[in-house]
Image: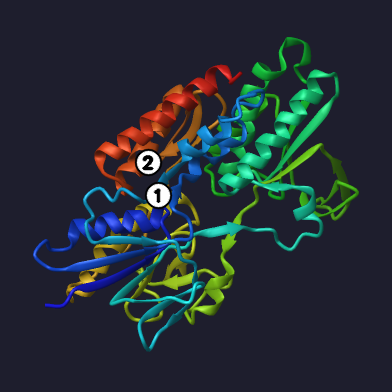
Amino acid sequence: MSTRQVVIVGGGFGGLGSLKALYQSFPKHLKIQVTLLDPADHQLYYPWVYQVASAGLTSTDPNFEAALTTLTTFDYSNWSGYKNTNHYREELVGINQDRRTVLTASGRSFYFDTLLLAIGSTHQDFSIPGLTDNSIPLKNLEDALKIRTSLSKLVVRAQAGEQLTVAVIGAGPNGIEFITKLAHVLPHYLGANCLGSIKLQLLDPASTIGRFLSPKLNQNFETRLTQLKIDLLLGRRLVGFKNGTGNFTLPNGHQEKISADLFIWSAGVKPWPITNTLGLALDERGRIKVNEHLQTSISGIFAVGDTAVVSWDGGISNPPTAQAAHSFSRIAGFNLTAYLLHRPLSSVPKKIIWSLICTTGGNYACGNLWGWSFSSRLGFSLRCLADLRYFLFSWSVFRALKIWLKGVRFFLIENKYGHS
């Protein structure tokens, strides 16, 4: 019997989770060859990116940023027993449906019997004039290191007596986690004489923080922001910049100008432009449409994660979050096996209560778990366990524990004391 060829594009939550589920479900006596295509040589753990952006703001160690990179990126060199898996640093540029091949930027092509697209997303800029030149997005590791450098300079200025402002635009989980962490650690860097010299603002066009939140969880977040003296400015939609000042539209149509020494953009994601060229059915936001089995409009091609939207009966079932990619990756992996062996495919549940746990400064977290809303130090412990669960779904038990313990140990110390 011939060797089955599986190609997975993207080594994030969706890609690696599906890879592990594929090997768990594929019969040992049959032959399979898996090809992972990803331009990077590592997986980036996105839930810790905000930690990098606010870590060690007064550190003079030239190797500190390298250490942060090591804590949040995990190379693909160790496949933990996946003997027939090869990783190629290749960028997807197209799919040849007739020849069943994936085309890459280098000119190479990779044949597949079945293909999984898990290519993730990029930050959404809404074509706002001046956004790129006047703000830094908080999406990937490079962004986080730029933010850290900018914040370090602001700390020096604040220590010299200047009154400064940092504005985070986007009150989703990413923005909340970053600004609350920053509010917690800044006193360690500024000292008693400079407290309050850096004002923090969190802005969002919605009238309530996090439209996806329950009323109870919404209140928990707002209470925590108040405790940390973060100004919450809702109902303000950024329309552009002029002379480094953000112009915002209010619900009544009036304009408001807000000045800040550093603007950080954390207001959503969008699919990579490549999805428009693959010949797959897309929704109105450019995400790849998949059915309840995570199949695209082309037979044998599946999609999972931020790049895909599960839609049937007129409903959308998955938000573009790491949690959704992680949850659906197991179904994707099992269905890759089922498709190859002509077995019935598994379905995504039509009704899912998505849990959410966000750290909110220090060893503290707010969240919603199985309908229970909480705001406590216990919540932080639950978040740490959730991180471990992510790693266990992507790597071997030994490697998952090693990654998790190293990261948690560092960030626990950072959360409590700051870094000097």
Q: Quadrant of the C terminus?
A: top right
Residue 199 visible in the snapshot: no
> Which numbered dot is residue 59?
none
Label whose residue precedes the other's in the sequence (1 or 2): 1
Q: Write the residue at 26% across / 73% down.
A: 5
- Name the one closer to the observer, 198 or 224: 198
Toward the top, the furthest residue is 192
Count of numbered badges drawn on the protein: 2
Q: Which residue is mark 2?
A: 370
Q: Position of residue 132 (x, y in %)?
A: 75, 54
Q: Write the residue at 82% across / 38% down.
A: 260
Q: Is residue 265 above or below residue 334?
A: above
Q: Is residue 62 above or below residue 233?
A: above
- Estimate how packed mark 2 is, as few (under 14), some (14 to 19) or many (20 or more) residues with alpha carbons within 10 Å: few
Amino acid type indicated by mark 2: Trp
On screen, residue 361 versus residue 189, left or right, reads left
Q: Callout 1: helix, strand or loop?
A: loop
Toward the bottom, the furthest residue is 98
Q: Which residue is mark 1?
A: 353
Q: Is residue 3 above or below residue 394?
A: below
On screen, residue 121 versus residue 256, left or right, reads left
Q: Position of residue 274 (x, y in %)?
A: 55, 72
Q: Callout 2: helix, strand or loop?
A: loop
Q: Position of residue 262 (x, y in %)?
A: 77, 39
Q: Are marks 1 and 2 in contact (CB under 8 Å)?
A: yes
